[in-house]
Image (cartoon, rainbow, N blue to C red):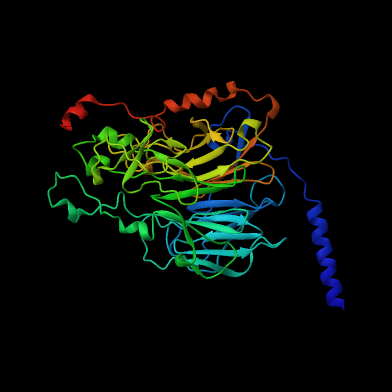
Amino acid sequence: MRILIALLTVGLILISCKSEIPVKKPMPDENNGGLFLPDGFGALVVVEEVGPSRHLAVNDNGDIYVKLRTDKGRNGNVALRDIDNDRKMDVIERFGDYPNDGRFATEMKIHNGYLYYSSEHVVYRQKLKHPNLIPVGKPEVMLTDIYPMRWHNAKSLAFDNEGWMYVTFSAPTNACEDLQLTGGDPDAIVRGQYPCEQLEILAGIWRFDANKPNQFQKDGIRYATGIRSVVGMSWNEQDSTLYAVNHGRDYLHNHAPQYFDKWEDAVLPAEEFMKINQGDDYGWPYTYWDHFKNKRMLAPEYGGDGEKEAEGYTDPIMGLPAHFAPNDLLFYKGDQFPERYKHGAFIAFHGSTNRGLYPQAGYIVAFIPFVDGKPTGEWEVFADGFTGVETVKQMKDAKYRPMGLAEGPDGALYISESKQGKIWCVMYLGNRETFEAGQLVSMEARKSRSYLKDPEFNLNEYIDNDR
């Protein structure tokens, strides 16, 4: 009895001490954590680094969960908690009682009281239980990918309101190319396998029971196909539809130098913003999207020459700049930001790695306004300053690469980056009712930077390509 009384007394003291912790009003860092934002917004760094990271999720009490980019050992997740309500994380704990199996382990999402996360081969979930920071119990295996490790192996997730879980199975190639079909001629156009066998189990999105453990790909249905590589995917509650941002293919010039010069290789094809319905076919590997022509084109590996159009496939709702690498997608639902942001889409552009001799591009968080349930067709620079340099000659030159997006319970926007694991919290500090277009002018001007614009066309290079 005495032991019980003593324990109760200690508990009351701890509760009393916690109640006396002063509540601090969150304020942005003096320099917004190095970010450039539209007028009226501010940002603070909630943690300087947790290690190379992918996606993140924020619970309704403000706890943050981050998926680490690691392929060794265990404890592939990080949990963070703010004790004194200043948004700076006071508690940082590693967790994850499962084997890490690849550096492109990506997903971290909260759904119906569970924390869902993925390695490259397995989707797990654990129960969140207040007041615990770390989810309770052992990770429950929800889905296992039985096929060998491959490129573009991230298992990104989305959940609808009817008990379904959507999972990406991306393709490891650019265009299902088969060099054996090229005939050994170094100047020949690279040929693609037809029909592409990868489409049987890859290059699509599959749907599974969100609450059923121990599933395999055969237990789901192929919801949509012809989608090369999706890392950012989200269910839009406004129209109850799945949306995703797709990584377009590379190497148009390398595979068909007769038809595509090095400049075209840098500016084509588009990354695709997709509204996905069951049964859609987005045309990979036989096609690509040209955002200058606003048309779906036949891929050179299948007889295309930059002019032949492809018919019978689903079009994206918007083409995005080539090679920007859209790695997360978030539809804003909160009320903290001005009304124009509500139901619009934030996209984290991880940044390019292969624009040849031209500067690399992307490395921002963009915003796409929606009007009457459709994107306006224009993207805005919402958060910039991640590169740390004016020109990104190679990906390694960029200081940070924005990766994950999550909305906090009060409508703040959290941004993660993949190099060091830095996390920012973006808040709106002004009067949301009086926000005006003039507050976006400074951000629009940032599109003149080399990592946000198409490179200048070089006529001498065009002639040298002997097209």
Would you say 255 lies left or right of 404 here?
A: left
Would you say 357 lies left or right of 382 here?
A: left
Say if 58 sits above or below 357 in the image. below
| Quarter of the image with the C terminus in it | top left
Would you say 46 lies left or right of 192 here?
A: right
Residue lying farthest to the front in this orientation: 312
Choose top left, top right, bottom left or bottom right for residue 296. top left
Say if 403 sits above or below 103 in the image. above
Say if 151 sits above or below 100 in the image. above
Say if 449 sits above or below 184 in the image. above
Viewer-nearest residue: 79 or 120: 120
Residue lying farthest to the bottom in this orientation: 1
Viewer-nearest residue: 343 or 85: 343
Viewer-nearest residue: 142 or 392: 142
Image coords of residue 4 (percent x, y): 84, 75
Image coords of residue 128 (percent x, y): 66, 62
Question: Would you say residue 388 is visible in this rendering?
Answer: no
Count of numbered labels shown in the rendering: 0
Viewer-nearest residue: 458 or 178: 178
Choose top left, top right, bottom left or bottom right for residue 428. top right
Image coords of residue 99 (percent x, y): 48, 68
Q: Residue at x 82, y 71 (%)?
A: 7
| Quarter of the image with the N terminus in it | bottom right
Residue lying farthest to the top in this orientation: 438
Question: Would you say residue 13 is visible in this rendering?
Answer: yes
Image coords of residue 389 (percent x, y): 42, 34
